[in-house]
Image (cartoon, grey):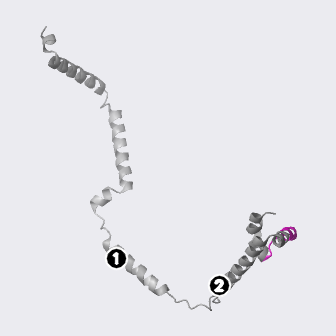
Amino acid sequence: MNCATAKEWMPHYIDGLLSPEAELRIRLHIESCPDCAQWLEEAKEMSALWNEMESGQEPLDFLDVPDITADVMAQVEQLETGRRERAVRTTMARRRTAPRTSWIHYGVAVGLTFLLLQLGVFQDMAYGITEINGHMSTSVSAWLNPDSVNK
């Protein structure tokens, strides 16, 4: 067994949830590996601290740690109140730029385009563009070569 596997199964070993064969393999590895033995001791200490916290006991009785929860929550509330006061009020202009309304605009544009295509509004457009191109070509040619048009 390698160290990574032993460390992965260490919590189950501590809780006694492993099969006898797996427990034996981990125990043999721990006896031969000082790093994993130290890891096991640290894991047992962490497990003991966790169990103390779950049972409602104070594990840090030896430390004088001040309770700052009320101060932190008051500061959070003050920041939230300031954020609400600085928030931009919703206006019609702001609503129009919302992402969901842009999809509505695209949908309406697609629907109108489809309707106009079905009604045949664009059927003579290609002829009109060709005719405009012809007039433009003639006028540009006349402007660049005034002698060739008069002949």
Q: Nearer the viewer, residue 50 or 35?
A: 35
Q: Which residue is mark 1?
A: 82
Q: Nearer the viewer, residue 114 or 97?
A: 97
Label 1: element kind: helix
Snapshot quadrant of residue 97: bottom left
Q: Residue at x 76, y 64 (%)?
A: 5
Snapshot quadrant of residue 87: bottom left
List x then y, in percent, for residue 46: 69, 79
Snapshot quadrant of residue 42: bottom right
- The three-letter amino acid code for the residue at tag 2 is Met
Q: Which label number is shown at residue 122?
A: none
Q: Residue furthest front?
A: 34
Describe residue 75's horizontal placement relative to residue 19 as left or right: left
Q: Which residues are magenta?
A: 15-25
List x then y, in percent, for residue 19: 84, 69
Secondary structure mostly taken by the magenta-highlighted segment of the chain: helix
- The three-letter amino acid code for the residue at tag 1 is Gly
The C terminus - image quarter? top left
The residue carrying pointer 1 sits among few (fewer than 14), some (14 to 19) or many (20 or more) residues within 10 Å by Cα, namely few
Label 2: element kind: helix
Residue 21: in magenta span: yes
Q: Which residue is mark 2?
A: 53
List x then y, in percent, for residue 120: 32, 30
The N terminus - image quarter? bottom right
Which callout, 2 or 1, points at the residue further toward the start of the chain?
A: 2
Q: CA distance from mark 2 to mark 1?
A: 36 Å
The residue carrying pointer 2 sits among few (fewer than 14), some (14 to 19) or many (20 or more) residues within 10 Å by Cα, namely few
Q: Residue at x 12, y 10 (%)?
A: 150
List x then y, in percent, for residue 76: 42, 79
